[in-house]
Amino acid sequence: MEHPKDIGDKSTLAIMLALRLHCYALLMPFGENTRYDLVIDNGSCLRRVQCKTGRLRNGVVLFATCSSYAHHGSTAKPRRDYRGEVDDFAVFCRELGAVYLIPIEDLDVRNQGSLRVDPPVNGQRKNVRFASAYEIARIDLY
């Protein structure tokens, strides 16, 4: 079984490659105590990016938009979102080999993010976040 840290590291590498292919300059914070994993520079502004691993479930890419602090023993706030601390989520979905870049304001950050890959069976389009609108690259790591 692959260790969760290794899975996350591979996702971050795929995301970094995709961002470089899109001509972003990448900056990495020193240490482990920042709420963002990367900073991207498009030549006119800097944006803080949180990298996540997405999982394909029933035609939807799902990914965490909160961090869990339950293992720290404090039950006062076991989950913490990224509002005000990151500008974008970058998501690598291993099953699709796809990398997505999603502005935080496009997401409900209280639980988990979702990007629809397959069309909804009921044909609904309003309020549906389609993955194709956020896809920046396909990366084959496996």
Image: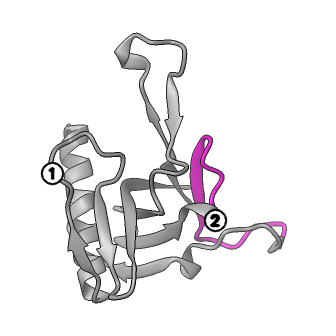
Task: Give the residue type at disc 2.
Answer: Asp
Question: Judging from the image, what secondary structure is the residue with disc 1 in?
Answer: loop
Q: What is the span of residues highlighted in magenta in the rendered image?
A: 107-123
Query: What residue is rendered at 34% in x and 80% in y?
Result: 138
Which disc number belongs to residue 106? 2
Up/down of 51 relative to 130, above or below = above
The quadrant where residue 95 appears? bottom left
Question: Judging from the image, what secondary structure is the residue with disc 2 in?
Answer: helix
In magenta stretch: residue 45 = no
Q: Residues within 10 Å of mark 2 (few under 14, many from 20)?
A: few
From the viewer's perspective, tell me whether residue 37 is left or right of residue 64.
left
Tell me whether the residue at label 1 lies in contact with that at label 2, contact meaning CB atoms closer than 8 angstroms: no
Quadrant containing the C terminus is: bottom left
Quadrant containing the N terminus is: top left
Q: Give the color scheme: rainbow, by chain, secondary structure or one colour.
A: one colour
**Label 1 belongs to which residue?**
30
Q: Position of residue 108 (x, y in %)?
A: 66, 52
Q: Position of residue 137 (x, y in %)?
A: 36, 82
Task: Give the residue type at disc 1.
Answer: Phe
Q: Position of residue 84 (x, y in %)?
A: 52, 51
User: Which numbered disc flags the more N-terminal residue, 1 or 2?
Assistant: 1
